[in-house]
Image (cartoon, rainbow, N blue to C red):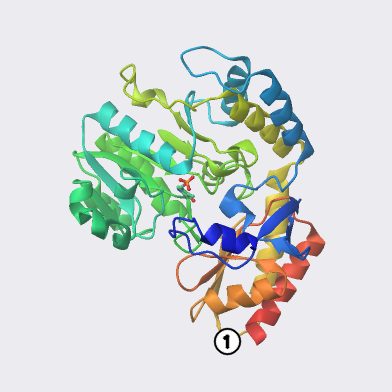
Amino acid sequence: MSIQEREDAHTSGLYQKRPLAIVRGEGALVWDAYGNELIDCVGGQGSANLGHGNAAVADAIAAQARTLASCTELFYNDRRAELYDLLSSLLPSELDRIFLCNSGTEAIEGALKFARMATGRTGVVATMRGFHGKTMGALAATWGPEYREALGGAALFPGATHIAFNKVEALDAAITADTAAFVVELVQGEGGVRPATNEFVREAVRLCRERGALLIVDEVQTGFCRTGAFFAIERYGIVPDILCLAKSIAGGVPMGAIAFSRRVGDLPKRSHSTTFGGNPLACAAAVAAIGEMRRLDLARCARERGEQLQAGLRGIESPRVREVRGLGLLAGIELKENAGPTIKALQDLGVLALGAGPTVVRYLPPLVITAAQVELVVAATATALAT
Ligand SMILES: *Cc1c(COP(=O)(O)O)cnc(C)c1O
């Protein structure tokens, strides 16, 4: 039986899978079960910023697994202390409290709870096309009524509203004295690679302050050098009250984090927790991964290769293209048609790309992708769009 047949026999059926089994990776390249090489612009959907097979992360995981893998936050731990130090050295000084968890959706769940507990309010304002995960609480913020329909629709999270992204006037109407938090991505990833305007972000900061709501910025996809800075908040020059992180934080090992400011205040003891949060294995992986991101200056890589990729994509003359958008190495082409056939054509040409909404082809490669590989990605895209 093939890998695909064995998975299909037991898979949940919830994922829309491509008929391709990936078995190995190195840098921005991956190989399928038959030994075919592909350029990976899916990048673990944003969890592989550091590239596949990083030796420093692999060594740190192996060493920590032999030393101590499990240690809950009932106790203190050396690796966790090291990670707190490292994260807070990268983050704005206001964000000096950190809760460690295990995924992006879990970071959003916690952030929504913190905001409700801190403000005593229940309202959550989010944006249309926003994506914040799919667990029950995070679904309050995620756009896509289809995800909520079978679960009670609007009743799932009373007090949640969605406003048009980048529409400044909508902020003023939506953020009120009942709003616990406004949740936003600085570049909508799943929603079609749409960067927020400076004006929208600044007005959100101002209104949240003025009306006593907390600003939650979701950097699960934009974090860890993706947009050309360690965090996209640096590119926008803002400091939120709560910052959600995950995906590439630990070099591919599952981990999430919620960084928050004193504005959140003291949270009641035991009001939130998770067994695996801050486990030494994930902390060791994160310490090594962040060290490598710094050593390799991945923020600069994302700026330079991102500029190259976006310029290359803009240079493709095709009547099928509506627009090229992006920030750093989070890039997308919006087509005038369904993106599916182009993504399939790219795969046949040896480039893995992602969708982002029905008409957008999204590129989320490891930030270690080389200039020559970016050139190949652009050439393959031109070919895919010419046929
Ligand atoms: C992927 C993603 C999430 C959800 O993260 P999971 O680890 O898949 O739960 C939340 N927000 C954004 C912006 C994301 O890209």
- Can residue 316 be spotted in the picture? no
Q: How many marks?
A: 1
Q: Is mark 1 within 8 Å of ligand 1?
A: no
Image point 29% across, 51% down: which residue? 171
Q: Secondary structure at mark 1?
A: loop
Badge 1: how crowded within 10 Å, few (<14), some, or many (20+)? Answer: few
Q: Quadrant of residue 298?
A: top right
Q: Position of residue 127 (x, y in %)?
A: 34, 55
Describe residue 331's horizontal placement relative to residue 16 as left or right: right
Q: Quadrant of residue 273?
A: top left
The quadrant of the picture occupied by the N terminus is bottom right
Q: Position of residue 294 (x, y in %)?
A: 72, 36
The single residue placed furthest to the top in the displayed view is: 75
Image point 31% across, 23% down: which residue? 271
Q: Position of residue 148 (x, y in %)?
A: 28, 56
Q: Quadrant of residue 129?
A: bottom left
Give, as a three-letter code, the residue at label 1: Pro
Describe residue 216's horizontal placement relative to residue 121 as left or right: right
User: Considering only vertical position in the picture, is 42 above or below 100?
Assistant: below
The quadrant of the picture occupied by the C terminus is bottom right
Describe residue 284's horizontal placement relative to residue 167 as left or right: right
Q: Position of residue 335 (x, y in %)?
A: 52, 77
The single residue placed furthest to the right in the displayed view is: 372
Q: Nearer the viewer, residue 370 or 53?
A: 53
User: Considering only vertical position in the picture, is 167 above or below 107?
Assistant: below
- Can residue 374 be spotted in the picture? yes
Q: Which residue is mark 1?
A: 319
Image point 22% across, 52% down: which residue? 173
